[in-house]
Amino acid sequence: MAAYLIADVVEMTDPAGFQEYTRRVAKTVEQYGGKYLVRGGVAKKAEGIWDPGRVVVIEFETMEHLKKWYHSKEYSGPMKLRQQSASTNVLFVEGVS
């Protein structure tokens, strides 16, 4: 069953650092079989209190693949860059079978 990483970049505190993150992360996503479905396009609130910043959705074959990528040594450097340069909310969500 497919699994999705959904990220909301609430605030970029270091735009140059975040730009470096985006340059480095795509290679790791691809290496682990991930596919970007949404990567920072316009997001408009329709209902509720959530006011997202930059939204990213990445699809992986399974939750296991997603977790392997997220906890991999290849992603650890880019992750540290993201954490240092932005405030981000991240969810792991299973798709439907």
Image (cartoon, rainbow, N blue to C red):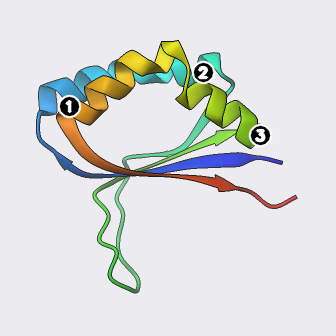
Question: What type is the residue that disc 1 sits on?
Answer: Gln
> Would you say the residues marked 1 and 3 are in contact, meaning their CB atoms lie under 8 Å apart?
no
The outermost residue toward the right is 97
Alpha carbon separation for disc pair 1 and 3: 28 Å
Identify whether 41 is placed above or below 86.
below
> Would you say the residues marked 2 and 3 are in contact, meaning their CB atoms lie under 8 Å apart?
no
Residue at 35%, 76% (x, y): give it.
45
Q: Secondary structure at mark 1?
A: helix
Q: Which is in the foreground here, disc 2 or disc 1?
A: 1
Alpha carbon separation for disc pair 2 and 3: 14 Å
Tell me, yes or no, if residue 27 can be seen here. no
Q: Residue 63's spot in the image, x, y percent? A: 72, 42
Could you tell which of marks 1 and 3 lies nearer the N-terminus?
3
Identify the residue under disc 1: 84
Q: Residue 16's spot in the image, x, y percent? A: 14, 25
> Would you say the residues marked 2 and 1 are in contact, meaning their CB atoms lie under 8 Å apart?
no
Q: Residue 4's spot in the image, x, y percent? A: 63, 48
Identify the residue under disc 3: 62
